[in-house]
Image: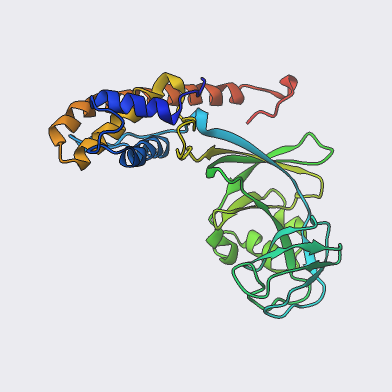
């Protein structure tokens, strides 16, 4: 489905619904813009509530929000010289990129220089500084920056270098990284010098600070690849030419009516707002049902693929 409707198209629809000109002082475009953005956000994030009945719609994954991201992976390193708090270098023999982020026993550290033996240009203070003292031979793990439009993870895969092996990674809470109770193998893998053989069969990922993707598996070799599917954030309208996130088939029957109802409620015109309520609510319900069915069909098609098709059955 295409997405060609602009903010100006939505303005035209909104002011047509309330039978006012775009220059109406009682319904300024600045306020209408805020309600248009709120309507699109609520629809995409699943915050849709009927104004009369308080019924809340249950949203499944919306396929028009789905995106993919890919990373080339790097194997973990180990600290060779114990760093002090606030150090601006970290000695560790590594194959990491020349700049990036690493995780070490709960510290998320940024660096802007790397000669293969030392990470340098680490800030002395702040969120990405070395905030704890770390012992030599502690493991250092590379982190991968999430896309700027990332909202919610769908699923993640690891593809092993020079292999047909493709594994699904299981998401875990980042608080479990420092807690041995849920997964003692993972805890010891991260926090001690245990062999990777203790992680045989284990494959995880965690999201840190809603900014970093942290894959956790013994099979994470340099040159392998991570791919994941995620739901993107909806567009935030600012200029008249900005495109809507919601496809053309649904956008004009959902956003303008929902935005106008919010505008009218804001203007203490509840009776008029209620008149619009059932129309936009039913249209959003229909849209959710369509994409839920579409998503279920896509998942079924993936399940029935086999190795003979050139795909891994998942």
Q: Residue at x 48, y 22 (%)?
A: 294
Rendered view: 177 above or below 17: below
Viewer-nearest residue: 20 or 276: 20
Residue 80 at x, y percent in the picture = 82, 73
Inspect this view and state whether residue 254 appears: no
Q: Residue at x 77, y 72 (%)?
A: 89
Viewer-nearest residue: 143 or 224: 143
Residue 295 at x, y percent in the picture = 50, 26
Instruction: Answer with the quarter of the image where residue 13 lies.
Output: top left
Instruction: Answer with the quarter of the image where residue 133 lies.
Output: bottom right
Q: Residue furthest bottom?
A: 84
Q: Residue at x 75, y 42 (%)?
A: 225
Instruction: Answer with the quarter of the image where residue 240 lies.
Output: top left
Residue 211 lies left or right of residue 201; in this view the side is left
Q: Residue furthest left?
A: 271
Rendered view: 290 above or below 189: above
Residue 142 lies left or right of residue 106; in this view the side is right
């Amino acid at each position: 489905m295409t997405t060609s409707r602009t903010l100006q198209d939505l303005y035209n629809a909104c002011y047509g619904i309330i039978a006012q000109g775009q220059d109406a002082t009682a319904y300024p475009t600045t306020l209408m813009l805020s309600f248009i953005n709120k309507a699109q956000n609520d629809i995409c994030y699943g915050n849709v509530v009927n104004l009369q009945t308080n019924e809340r719609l249950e949203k499944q994954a919306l396929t028009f929000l789905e995106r993919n991201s890919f990373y080339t992976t790097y194997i973990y390193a180990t600290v060779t010289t114990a760093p002090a708090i606030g150090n601006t270098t970290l000695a560790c023999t590594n194959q990491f990129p020349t700049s990036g982020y690493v995780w070490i026993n709960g510290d998320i550290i940024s660096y802007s220089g790397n000669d293969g033996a030392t990470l340098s240009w680490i800030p002395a203070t702040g969120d990405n500084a070395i905030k704890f003292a770390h012992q030599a031979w502690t493991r250092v793990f590379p982190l991968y920056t999430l896309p700027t439009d990332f909202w919610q993870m769908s699923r993640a895969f690891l593809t092993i270098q020079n292999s047909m092996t493709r594994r699904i990674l299981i998401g875990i809470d980042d608080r479990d990284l420092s807690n041995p109770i849920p997964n003692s193998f993972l805890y010891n893998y991260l926090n001690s010098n245990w062999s990777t053989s203790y992680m045989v069969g284990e494959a995880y990922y965690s999201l840190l600070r809603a900014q970093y993707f942290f894959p956790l598996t013994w099979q994470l070799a340099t040159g392998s690849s991570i791919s994941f599917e995620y739901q993107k954030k909806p567009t935030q309208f600012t200029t008249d030419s900005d495109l809507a996130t919601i496809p053309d088939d649904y956008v004009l029957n959902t956003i303008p009516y929902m935005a106008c109802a919010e505008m009218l409620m804001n203007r203490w015109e509840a009776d008029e707002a209620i008149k619009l309520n059932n129309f936009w609510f039913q249209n959003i319900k229909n849209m959710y049902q369509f994409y839920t069915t579409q998503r279920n069909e896509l998942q079924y098609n993936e399940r029935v693929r086999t190795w003979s098709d050139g795909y891994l059955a998942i």
